[in-house]
Amino acid sequence: MKTIKRTVVLKASHSCNLSCVYCYDKRRQAVPSDSKSIEPSNVVKILSEKLPPSEILFCLHGGEPLLIGHNEFLELVSAIREANVKHKFRLSIQTNATLVDTGFINIFKDCKDLFEERGIGVSIDGPQFINDVTRVKASGAGASLDILEGISLLQLAGIDFGLLCVIGRHNVKYPSDVYQFLTSLSPGFIRFIPCHDVDDTGYLTRYSIAPSEFSLFLTSVFRSWLADTKTTIPVDPFVTIIGNIYGHTASWCEYESGSKCAGFLLVDHNGGVACCDNWGIEGTRSDSQSVYTMSPEKLVNLFVDPTSGSRIPQYYSTLLNTCHKCSIWQECNGGCLAVRQQFEKNNLHLAQDYCDAKKALINYIRKAIKMLGT
Ligand code: SF4
Ligand code: SF4
């Protein structure tokens, strides 16, 4: 059997010590919201036991994944090391960094070899006057200073980290401030992620923006990035789009043409399995069972095709049919299918805007690359 290569998003905890106004977990309903935590080390052990030799990137997610604490994190690391006699398991985390302390710094140093190249992603939305609008503590006070304290510990310890920046109503008009601030933190990478949620009546939610607004933001940042001759920081989606222009294989599902949503599995507390949580309830499986109770055979089938048993495959052909004839197919590769499906269902104007915005951005990048003659 071919080696199974997958990303497993481990929802270590649904709890979070912050209370961001556009919270990812609050705005999606794929998994029940409660305060229980899984023990990620147990999931790793059970997968190691039941799967044939596999390459799995565990992306520790939440809520806030560092809420699992030092001891459980150490258990996880040791479970991965034990599993790696048979498998090739790696680790990454997406954190708000406010719980990074000397204990975690020592753990991260000790398991540097297990971290994926872009292993630690810290979420921050820009300088304090922007970030504190959305990324707040339960009291409502902005979390910037706590986040920066965590980042500073990572920097002092020489631990690589990248920045994940959600673009929404709060920062879409500040491309220059956001770019200057993020690069000033010397991250290993920057990734911009749009907030595109719509409500059931098809309206953008309070902090959501239309794809064309995101595209204008990105175009402006792209200009700054190109003009910034000293920077070596890879900024996404630019690096991925340029890679696609040159025919490389993208690793970001939104920009790759192969497995797309079938490259992911989400494991929730109690071992329940769903697809990428951008799909919300449509990514849940009709035959949902825990990884603990599933037979090895069933688990292997699930890893071979993580979307089977969900409603996702039924959307593939309609969403991707138009893409194959599209002038930017090679660079866009269909975008995020969950976002597009959400627009198709609730707001056709936004569905059209999604493609127009992709074309505007990608054609701009194509032209700039051509002019640079690279
Ligand atoms: S729903 Fe979007 S983000 Fe999730 S796997 Fe599919 S393309 Fe990627
Ligand atoms: S722009 Fe739209 S139609 Fe073209 S490849 Fe991207 S998602 Fe598909």
Image (cartoon, rainbow, N blue to C red):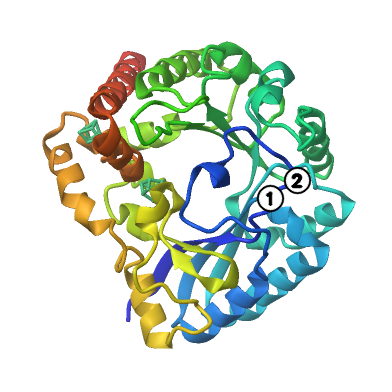
Amino acid bearing label 1: Glu
Please say if 71 is above or below 128. below
Task: Please indicate whether residue 343 sits to the left or right of residue 96 in the image.
Answer: left
Is disc 2 in contact with disc 1, using a CB cutoff of under 8 Å?
yes
Q: Nearer the viewer, residue 90 or 368?
A: 90
| Residue 337, x across and y down, in percent | 31, 44
Which image quadrant: the C terminus?
top left
| Residue 372, x across and y down, in percent | 36, 16
Amino acid bearing label 2: Asn
Q: Secondary structure at mark 2?
A: loop
| Residue 273, x across and y down, in percent | 46, 68
Please say if 79 is above or below 123. below
Q: Secondary structure at mark 1?
A: loop
Q: Residue at x 41, y 26 (%)?
A: 204
Q: Residue at x 67, y 71 (%)?
A: 39
Please say if 44 is above or below 8. below
Q: Residue at x 52, y 62 (%)?
A: 57
Visible in this render: residue 248?
no
For disc 2, the neighbor class at 10 Å (few under 14, some 14 to 19, many from 20) is some
Residue matched to label 1: 64
Single out the residue that lies furthest toward the left.
325
For marks 2 and 1, give the CA distance: 7 Å
Q: Nearer the viewer, residue 92 or 302?
A: 302
Residue matched to label 2: 17
* Res 216 → quadrant: top left
| Residue 330, x across and y down, in percent | 23, 37
Single out the residue that lies furthest toward the right.
102
Mark in front: 2 vs 1? 2
For disc 1, the neighbor class at 10 Å (few under 14, some 14 to 19, many from 20) is many
Is tag 2's residue or tag 1's residue first in the polypeptide sequence? Answer: 2
Quadrant location, ligand no. 2: top left
